[in-house]
């Protein structure tokens, strides 16, 4: 997974102070042949835009990858409403940039990126792959507007959302990639650029919770992947954890 931040600071949802408990993930696709993220982010990055998602997968300023646009736990206007309500205030939502829907190589690339992003988010927020739905499924469940994504695209390449959830689960259970770099404990994280010091502070501020085995310090098991540490570093540098740090007398 290639995970970057590309903050939409002009969007009305970016500056909201209220956060919510993340309960699931909604997977969208853009509905047009455009592999670059900027045509979408340029529209969303305005105060007038009432539509936005937390992230987007496609070609961006730093190359192909997943781009976080809004803090994951903020309300966004991504899926509309259904007859039971909306997932806008409870689910992380991201778009996948479509092509012409027929290129198998492109599909495999974005599909894999989306699977890895969801695995990262499931781990980060301690949610099950079973909570992942696409926009079409969210509509059927009564919590989104009537859109067909991603079921107009995935089946063309032999994939269903059940396949998608199963592939996310494989990563989380370790069945998928034995070569993924993971850090079981704080002491395992390299500190050549200050990563270990940063994680130590975030644990003290209760931004990151271990397994509870160390009741008085930060020596309990945390099991963070290298990608998770990298994303936490982006958010740390952006000041997203400053309030939590200040509450325990720490600064960046």
Image: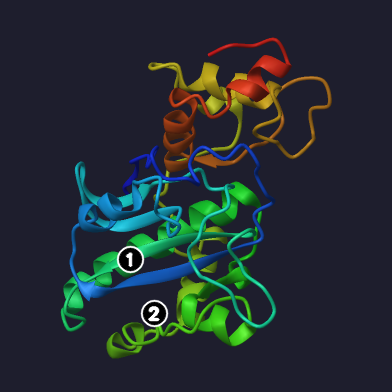
Circle 2 packing at 10 Å, graded few (<14), some (14-19), many (20+), is many
Question: Taking the image as drawn, is residue 111 in sight?
Answer: yes
The location of residue 175, given as percent across then percent down, is 50, 64
Q: Are marks 2 and 1 in contact (CB under 8 Å)?
A: yes
Q: Position of residue 144 (x, y in %)?
A: 56, 76
Q: Give the camera-side residue of 174 and 112.
A: 112
The residue wearing badge 2 is 150
Query: Considering the numbered disc 2 on the image, is that residue within a helix, a strand or a loop?
Result: loop
Instruction: Say few, some or many: other residues with alpha carbon within 10 Å of mark 1 (under 14 / 14 to 19 / 20 or more).
Output: many
Residue topped by disc 1:
96
Residue 171 coordinates in the image, percent (x, y): 49, 61
Lower sequence index among marks 2 and 1 = 1
Query: Separation of disc 2 and disc 1 at Cα?
Result: 9 Å
Residue at the spot x=58%, y=52% of the render? 75
x then y, percent, for residue 55 = 40, 53
115 to 47, vertically: above or below: below
The residue lying toward the viewer, choosing from 187 and 193, is 193
Locate residue 45 relative to residue 171 in the image: left or right.
left
Residue at figure coordinates x 45%, y 69% from the top left: 27
> Across the whole image, how many numbered discs are drawn on residues?
2
Q: Residue furthest right?
A: 215
Left or right: residue 39 compared with residue 194: left
Q: Looking at the picture, does residue 152 appear above or below residue 145?
A: below
State whether residue 1 appears in this view: no
Helix, strand or loop status at disc 1: strand
């Amino acid at each position: 997974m290639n995970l970057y931040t590309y903050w939409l600071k002009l969007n009305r949802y970016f500056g909201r102070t209220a956060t919510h408990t993340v309960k699931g993930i909604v997977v969208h696709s853009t509905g047009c042949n455009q592999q670059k993220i900027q045509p979408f982010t340029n529209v969303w990055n305005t105060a007038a835009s009432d539509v936005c998602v937390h992230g987007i997968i496609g070609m961006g300023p730093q190359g192909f990858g997943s781009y976080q646009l809004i803090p994951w736990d903020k309300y966004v206007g991504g899926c509309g409403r259904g007859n039971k309500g909306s997932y806008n205030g409870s689910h992380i939502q991201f778009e996948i940039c479509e092509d012409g829907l027929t290129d198998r190589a492109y599909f495999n690339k974005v599909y894999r990126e989306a699977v890895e992003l969801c695995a990262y988010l499931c781990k980060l927020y301690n949610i099950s792959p079973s909570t992942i739905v696409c926009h079409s499924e969210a509509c059927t469940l009564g919590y989104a507007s009537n859109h067909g994504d991603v079921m107009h695209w995935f089946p063309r390449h032999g994939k269903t959302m059940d396949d998608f959830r199963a592939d996310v689960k494989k990563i989380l259970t370790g069945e998928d990639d034995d070569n993924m770099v993971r850090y079981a404990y704080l002491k395992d994280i390299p500190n050549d650029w200050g990563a270990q010091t940063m994680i130590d502070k975030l644990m003290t501020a209760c931004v990151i919770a271990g397994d509870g085995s160390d009741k008085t310090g930060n020596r309990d098991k945390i099991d963070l992947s290298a990608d998770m540490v990298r994303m936490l570093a982006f958010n740390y540098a952006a000041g997203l954890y400053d309030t939590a740090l200040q509450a325990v007398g720490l600064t960046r």
